[in-house]
Amino acid sequence: ELKVEQNPLFLSMQEGKNYTIYCNYSTTSDRLYWYRQDPGKSLESLFVLLSNGAVKQEGRLMASLDTKARLSTLHITAAVHDLSATYFCAVEVAGNMLTFGGGTRLMVKP
Amino acid sequence: DSGVTQTPKHLITATGQRVTLRCSPRSGDLSVYWYQQSLDQGLQFLIQYYNGEERAKGNILERFSAQQFPDLHSELNLSSLELGDSALYFCASSYFWQGGTDTQYFGPGTRLTVL
């Protein structure tokens, strides 16, 4: 059974600081997704990582994938309050089914 | 706005009852997925349909069933409801059911409360 683990589960950081969220998964997969969820809202797609070594950046967020280590990271640069949300990684298995991590709740304080 | 619509937004019902949740995928998307989000179980995949046919099943209870209609909208039926079924139910859609850079786009969700 595929397991997807994120850490930390909760992250409180100051504006302007950098931090990294980690996503580990237990079986081989070449596709990994990052989603953002605001409280009470739906999931918004951030990144799709398709191959080993893939790196994608959008604004202050950068995601990378190491399929050999079964690890993806979401790096936050110079955090701002608007980035406060819960971030999920999801690993694709057969048939495009997604298995989600437990989520990382990010709170950025001024 | 992802283009995926779900109705109703909120649903409050009693234990033992049956409800139907509805989802309309993005225009052109052939695959529909259902997910359940709860505090104790997190986000869990329930079931996937592609062009009217069931393609994959996850942790879906026998009391739950789904279908996808010829116009590609989908319904998730939950019966003999229990308190533990209270959750946020998301529908997602994508164009391909397998392979490619096929992101799943999520609807706004239906919040089900079972009293």
Image: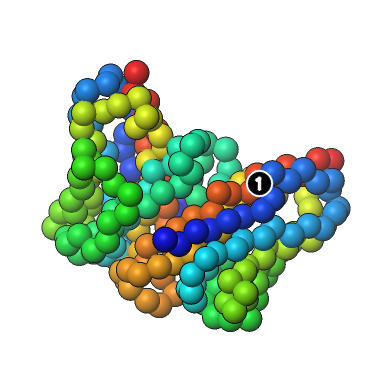
- Residue A85 in the image, given as x and y percentages of width and height: 64, 45
| Residue B9 appears left or right of B23 | right
Q: Secondary structure at mark 1?
A: loop
- Residue B19 in the image, given as x and y percentages of width and height: 23, 31
Residue drawn at point x = 49 percent, y = 70 percent: A27
Residue B99 found in image quarter? bottom left
- Residue A98 in the image, given as x and y percentages of width and height: 42, 60
Residue B12 found in image quarter? top left
| Residue A35 appears left or right of B22 | right
The quadrant in which the N terminus of chain A is found is: bottom left
Between A39 and B26, which is closer to the camera in this rendering? A39
Residue drawn at point x = 58 percent, y = 43 percent: A38
Give the number of callouts.
Answer: 1
Between A29 and A47, which is closer to the camera in this rendering? A29
Q: Is residue A42 above or below residue A52?
A: above
Q: Is residue B11 above or below residue A64?
A: above
- Whether residue A58 is visible here, answered yes or no, is no
Amino acid at pointer 1? Leu
Residue position for label 1: A9
Chain designation of label 1: A
The quadrant in which the C terminus of chain A is found is: top right
Between B62 and B20, which is closer to the camera in this rendering? B62
| Residue A73 appears left or right of B17 | right
Between B96 and A22, which is closer to the camera in this rendering? A22
